[in-house]
């Protein structure tokens, strides 16, 4: 078998969201389990949505979660560049190849010599693939209109760029969110047009809230950005553990697993077909378990930051250790030390 190569391909549109973190995490776990490479590629072609600092912040929070990668815009690597806007000449070259083969055509903008390039969708053709999570999926091309490969500003669309990159970067498995299932037949068309091998696809189910509704970024009832958990005093190891259980389960009913245990026990056939429920209580439970395992002086140093921010006078290290020791078993996140302290010492 070729060396496993997987990638996480975020658009730098803002903070790291729990759904993206999950995609990154499973690609990372997959790579580490199979002794493969994990690549971070930045998909920045939707320029109106890019946010300054978005890329750096995503990478920082992935690092905070305990992920590491083998190739990326910041590390470099043999398959770079790793930002799509730095690869425009490649997309242009491959689009030209499809034009030359008669598999794509130009569409001129009115009264202009600028043109977009559309893919000529084969007629009445079935696209079948065996999804790692869902098994066989089948689509017919009659439901797909000729779609744009390159916009008239020379920037590729996602469905085109993703194929060029996954091919050139020798990606073997594409693990991503369920919202990309309907993009897959379009991507298969491009692989076939070039006569390239098609990677194995795996689409992870949606994450739902406790009302079984798809988690939406606007949902005020669920905290969804990794940065928010960090600032509340959730531990990265606990977050990693919790996210790994969003759509996957080990063979045992063990719920507290280290990163290494998850990597060792990972089995793609245990990725769930049912939506993953974001269970806040479970997250609090897992985090409290990790807090209980921390040596007191380590926990004290973390708690100190929250207490100081709340202007609570820390009398001495011994006092802090004592205080933290009292509440260690009660905290679901470290920031809670403040309200626990206040309710304990300030009852009128
Ligand atoms: N940039 C895409 C996204 O953020 C990546 C999709 C893929 O993994 O193919 O959803």
Image (tube, rainbow, N blue to C red):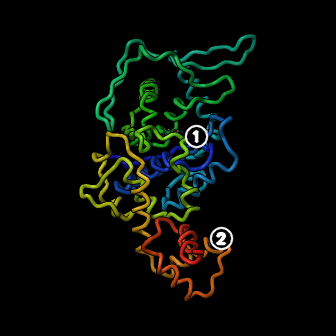
- Does 29 sit left or right of 50 as displayed? left
Given residues 218 and 249, the one toward you in this image is 218
Point 46% across, 59% down: residue: 239
Up-down: is 147 above or below 238?
above
Element under disc 1: loop
Q: Is residue 25 visible?
A: yes
Quarter containing the C terminus: bottom right
- Disc marking residue 231: none
Percent from the top left, x then y, of residue 286? Answer: 40, 62
Splitting the image into 4 quarters, where does residue 220 fall? top right
Percent from the top left, x then y, of residue 299? Answer: 51, 76
Residue sitting at the far left: 252
Point 40% across, 74% down: residue: 293
Q: Nearer the viewer, mark 2 or mark 1?
A: 2
Point 38% across, 44% down: residue: 276
- Does 195 sit left or right of 153 as displayed? left
Percent from the top left, x then y, of residue 297? Answer: 51, 82
Q: Is residue 191 visible?
A: no
In the rendered image, which residue does mark 2 sit on? Answer: 310
Q: Residues within 10 Å of mark 2 (few under 14, many from 20)?
A: few
Q: Earlier in the sequence, mark 2 or mark 1?
A: 1
Beta carbon at label 1 within 8 Å of ligand 1: yes
Given residues 216 and 113, the one toward you in this image is 216
- Does 259 sit left or right of 108 as displayed? left
In the rendered image, which residue does mark 1 sit on? Answer: 43
Up-down: is 243 above or below 218?
below
């Amino acid at each position: 078998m070729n060396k496993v190569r997987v990638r996480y391909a975020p658009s730098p549109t803002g903070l790291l969201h729990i759904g993206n973190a999950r995609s990154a995490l499973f690609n990372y776990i997959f790579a580490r389990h199979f002794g493969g490479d994990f690549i971070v590629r930045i998909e920045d072609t939707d320029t109106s949505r890019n946010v300054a600092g978005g890329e750096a912040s995503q990478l920082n929070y992935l690092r905070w979660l305990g992920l590491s990668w083998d190739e990326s815009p910041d590390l470099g690597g043999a398959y770079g560049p790793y930002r799509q806007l730095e690869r425009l000449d490649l997309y242009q070259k491959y689009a030209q190849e499809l034009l030359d083969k008669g598999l794509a055509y130009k569409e001129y903008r009115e009264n202009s010599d600028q043109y977009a390039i559309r893919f000529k969708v084969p007629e009445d053709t079935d696209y079948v693939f065996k999804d790692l999570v869902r098994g066989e999926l089948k689509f017919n091309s009659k439901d797909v209109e000729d779609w744009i490969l390159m916009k008239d500003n020379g920037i590729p669309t996602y469905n085109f760029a993703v194929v060029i990159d996954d091919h050139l970067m020798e990606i073997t498995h594409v693990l991503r969110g369920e919202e990309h299932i309907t993009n897959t037949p379009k991507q298969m068309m491009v692989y076939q047009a070039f006569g390239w091998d098609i990677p194995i696809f795996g689409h992870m189910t949606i994450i739902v809230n406790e009302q079984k509704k798809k988690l939406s970024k606007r949902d005020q009832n669920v905290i969804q950005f990794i940065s928010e958990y960090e600032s509340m005093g959730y531990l990265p190891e606990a977050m990693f553990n919790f996210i790994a259980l969003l759509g996957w389960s080990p063979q045992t009913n063990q719920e507290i697993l280290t990163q290494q245990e998850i990597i060792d026990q990972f089995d793609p056939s245990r990725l769930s077909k049912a939506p993953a429920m974001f269970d806040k209580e479970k997250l609090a439970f897992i985090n409290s378990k990790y807090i209980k395992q921390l040596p007191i002086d380590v926990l004290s140093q973390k708690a100190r930051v929250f207490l100081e921010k709340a202007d609570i006078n820390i009398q001495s290290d011994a006092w802090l250790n004592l205080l933290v020791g009292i509440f260690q078993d009660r905290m679901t996140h470290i920031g809670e030390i403040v309200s626990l302290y206040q309710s304990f010492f300030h009852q009128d």
